[in-house]
Amino acid sequence: MPISQESMEQRLIECFPMAIERRVFDVSGGCGQSYEVLIVSPEFAGKTTLAKHRLVNERLKDEISELHAFSQKTFTPEQYATVKENEQTKEN
């Protein structure tokens, strides 16, 4: 059963209440079968990328099991600030 973008966004709010940024991108052409998510949270501090992804996978396991594809980008606020700074540098 497809998952709406709104319901995925709501689950991110519920599962990651400390996150300062959460974004959900439906990359399935609107059918709700493939999502990319971006989560920026201080909760990820001190965790490896693998540990962060496992945490997301565990908390969203019911939703992920309904999808064809799921990808994630997870950052601490400090990491995300660096990513955004690097993106701005590339644009200039």
Image (spheres, rainbow, N blue to C red):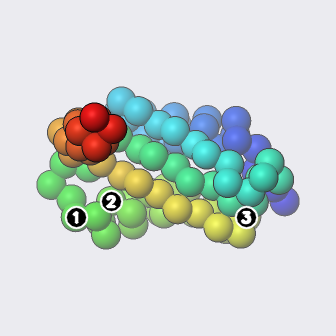
Q: CA distance from mark 3 to mark 1?
A: 26 Å
Res. 69 mark: none
Q: CA distance from mark 2 to mark 1?
A: 6 Å
Image position of 44 with respect to 6: above or below: below
Residues under numbered marks 3 and 1 in contact, where contact means CB atoms less than 8 Å apart: no
Residue at x-position 36% and y-position 30%? 20
Q: Which residue is mark 3?
A: 66
Front residue of 27/68: it is: 27
Q: Which residue is mark 1?
A: 48
Q: Earlier in the sequence, mark 2 or mark 3?
A: 2
Residues under numbered marks 2 and 1 in contact, where contact means CB atoms less than 8 Å apart: yes
Residues under numbered marks 2 and 3 in contact, where contact means CB atoms less than 8 Å apart: no
Q: Classify the position of the C terminus by image quarter.
A: top left
- Quarter of the view holding residue 18: top left
Q: Residue furthest front?
A: 92
What percent of the width, then of the height, locates residue 42? 24, 39
Image position of 90 with respect to 70: above or below: above
Residue at x-position 15% and y-position 55%? 46
Q: Which residue is mark 2?
A: 52
What percent of the width, then of the height, locates residue 39? 41, 44
- Total number of numbered discs in the rendering: 3
Q: Secondary structure under badge 3? A: loop
Q: Secondary structure under badge 1? A: loop
* Residue 60, visible in the rendered structure: yes
Residue neighbourhood size for the residue with mark 2, other residues' Cα within 10 Å, grouped as few (<14), some (14–19), many (≥20): many
Left/right placement of residue 13 relative to residue 45 reads: right
- Quarter of the view holding residue 81: top left
Q: Amino acid at mark 1?
A: Thr
What percent of the width, then of the height, locates residue 64? 63, 63
Residue neighbourhood size for the residue with mark 1, other residues' Cα within 10 Å, grouped as few (<14), some (14–19), many (≥20): few
